[in-house]
């Protein structure tokens, strides 16, 4: 991933190029072996080559957003700048040995379908190696990519919760650091939701409308929502506590100023009440401003965008089902 970052346009073109390469490789093998007529497309390969490059793209994009979010949040930590590189390194890497773990998980998961596939799918024994050569590269990348991105997501979101918990200079009036990690959580949540939608779409589950499609859709929703909200809940609690303390302090000041006003009125010192009146107005405005401080750590437009991305496909699905039902009648 560090090498990709050094390429033009931050290397984002590498991931679609990798999908095209996997697509070309799989079909070249099937065409050369005679298992597939030259020029025809295998739907399983065409839809399956997306998963591995997609996971790597999510890895790269979330890493970039994590570093930008860390830079924006850093003033709220109260820590010296010398600590920032260590946190940045943790956000963009995984513990040593995880690569071996995901390979140990992904490779058996990739090979298992071939070992358990029916003979009608595998075809003649002499051409099965061609089938494996065509399918396995994209399958291994996809099956190893999934545990990789899950572990990376868990690590990043735990770091978000940790830095929110340990920061010592969070200011409820300074919104930029408070909102800093909302971009990371919303992009990560949507990444899981989108891959769920893609899986449903390419498998025709939207048209089928069966229990599997409903459960998959619900699972995508659940993962996306939890990924978006859970890491930010801790700082929400801190903001609620900070706001309550600021409100209590504002109320105490307001009470002191009001008491001073009462004393001057009782003493008939009317000529000296103007300064108290101005102070009272200022204290009241401050209390109102504190009362309006938001405690949710994401700006309204981010929340609206996240909800739109969640709900729009559902609305399209419901409308398509209604139209389909009318056409069927």
Image (cartoon, grey):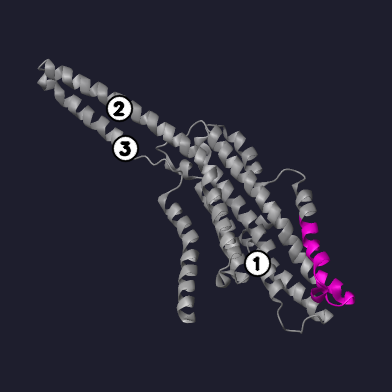
Q: Position of residue 139 (x, y in %)?
A: 74, 64
Left or right: where 32 falls relative to 230: right
Q: Main secondary structure of the magenta part?
A: helix
Q: Are the residues tagged 3 and 1 within 8 Å (C-beta)?
A: no
* Residue pictured at 86% horizontal, 76% vertical: 127
At mark 2, the secondary structure is: helix
Q: Which residue is mark 1?
A: 16
Q: Which residue is mark 2?
A: 251
Residue at the limit of the structure toward the front, as seen here: 329
| Residue 2 appears in the figure | no
Q: Is residue 41 magenta?
A: no
Q: Nearer the viewer, residue 312 or 138?
A: 312
Dot 1, crowdedness within 10 Å: few (<14), some or many (≥20)?
some
Q: Give the mark nearest the N terminus, 3 or 1.
A: 1
* Residue pictured at 48% horizontal, 56% vertical: 306
Q: Nearer the viewer, residue 210 or 270?
A: 210
Q: Nearer the viewer, residue 119 or 288?
A: 119
Q: Which residues are magenta?
A: 106-133
Kindly report the distance in space between the C-alpha atoms of the residues bearing marks 2 and 1. 58 Å
Q: Is residue 61 above or below residue 24?
A: above
């Amino acid at each position: 991933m560090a090498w990709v970052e050094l390429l033009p346009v931050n290397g984002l073109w590498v991931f679609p190029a990798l999908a095209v390469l996997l697509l070309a490789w799989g079909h070249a093998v099937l065409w050369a072996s005679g298992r597939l007529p030259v020029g025809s497309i295998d739907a399983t390969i065409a839809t399956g080559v997306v998963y591995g490059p997609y996971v790597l793209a999510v890895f790269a994009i979330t890493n970039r957003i994590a570093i930008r979010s860390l830079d924006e949040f850093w003033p709220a930590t109260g820590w010296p700048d010398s600590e920032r590189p260590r946190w940045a390194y943790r956000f963009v890497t995984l513990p040593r040995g995880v690569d071996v773990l995901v390979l140990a998980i992904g490779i058996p998961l990739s090979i298992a379908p071939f070992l358990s596939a029916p003979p009608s799918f595998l075809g003649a024994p002499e051409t099965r190696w061609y089938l494996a050569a065509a399918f396995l590269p994209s399958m291994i990348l996809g099956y190893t990519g999934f545990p990789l991105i899950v572990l990376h997501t868990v690590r990043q979101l735990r770091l978000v919760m940790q830095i929110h918990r340990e920061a010592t200079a969070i200011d409820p009036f300074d919104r930029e650091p408070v909102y800093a990690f909302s971009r990371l959580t919303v992009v990560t949540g949507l990444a899981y939701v989108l891959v769920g939608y893609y899986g449903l779409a390419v498998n025709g589950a939207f048209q089928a409308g069966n229990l599997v499609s409903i459960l998959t859709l619900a699972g995508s929703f659940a993962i996306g929502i939890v990924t978006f909200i859970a890491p930010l809940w801790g700082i929400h609690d801190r903001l609620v506590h900070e706001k309550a303390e600021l409100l209590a302090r504002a109320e105490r000041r307001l009470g002191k100023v009001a008491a001073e006003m009462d004393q001057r009125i009782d003493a008939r010192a009317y000529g000296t009440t103007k300064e108290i009146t101005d102070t009272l107005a200022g204290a009241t405005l401050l209390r109102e401003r504190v009362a309006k401080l938001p405690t949710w750590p994401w700006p309204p437009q981010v929340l609206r965008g996240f909800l739109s991305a969640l709900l729009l496909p559902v609305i399209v699905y419901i409308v398509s089902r209604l139209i389909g039902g009318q056409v069927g009648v």
